[in-house]
Image (cartoon, rainbow, N blue to C red):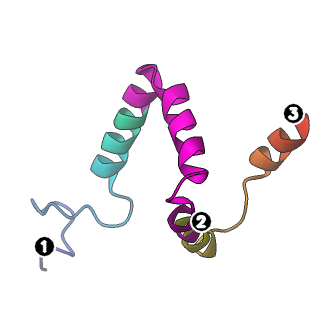
Amino acid sequence: MDKKQNPMSNSPNEGEGNKTAARQYNEAQQRFAQSGKVEEKAREAEKALDGPEKEVLQQAEAVGKRHSAGEDPAVENQKYQK
């Protein structure tokens, strides 16, 4: 049995659902949310959409949407509550 098949091996590959990466991502997101910079970064992003990088950002969004399963219904509901 090789390292890919043996779950007890010391391989850094965790397979599908990398728990280490997920934990690191979640911790980083929590630190950012608690940093107090969320509103500032949101304003920066809004300005970028009106600036010279608008087209590049829209292209990136289109690429992301092609890989998406669709808009989260919670996001749609928030649009109508404003």
Where is residue 28? Give x, y as percent. Answer: 35, 36
Q: Amino acid at mark 1?
A: Lys
For residue 58, the mark is 2
- The residue range painted magenta reads 30-59
Whether residue 65 is in magenta: the answer is no
| Label located before the other in sequence (3 or 2) | 2
Q: Amino acid at mark 3?
A: Lys
Residue at disc 1, secondary structure: loop
Q: Is residue 60 left or right of residue 79?
A: left
Residue at horizontal 53%, vertical 62%? 57
Q: Amino acid at mark 2?
A: Gln
Q: Using a 10 Å C-alpha cutoff, classify the residue at mark 3 as few (fewer than 14 neighbours), some (14 to 19) or many (20 or more).
A: few
For residue 40, the mark is none
Q: Using a 10 Å C-alpha cutoff, classify the residue at mark 2 as few (fewer than 14 neighbours), some (14 to 19) or many (20 or more).
A: few
Q: Which residue is mark 3?
A: 82
Residue at horizontal 60%, vertical 43%? 46
Q: Is residue 3 left or right of residue 16?
A: left
Q: Please, what is the dominant secondary structure of the magenta stretch? A: helix
Q: 38 or 15, which lies in front?
A: 38
Q: Quadrant of residue 70?
A: bottom right
Q: 29 or 12, which lies in front?
A: 29
Instruction: Spot the residue most to the bottom.
Output: 1
* Mark 3 to mark 2 CA distance (whole Å): 24 Å
The correct choice, above or below, for 27 with respect to 1 in the image is above
Where is residue 2? Give x, y as percent. Answer: 12, 79
| Label located before the other in sequence (3 or 1) | 1
The C terminus - image quarter: top right
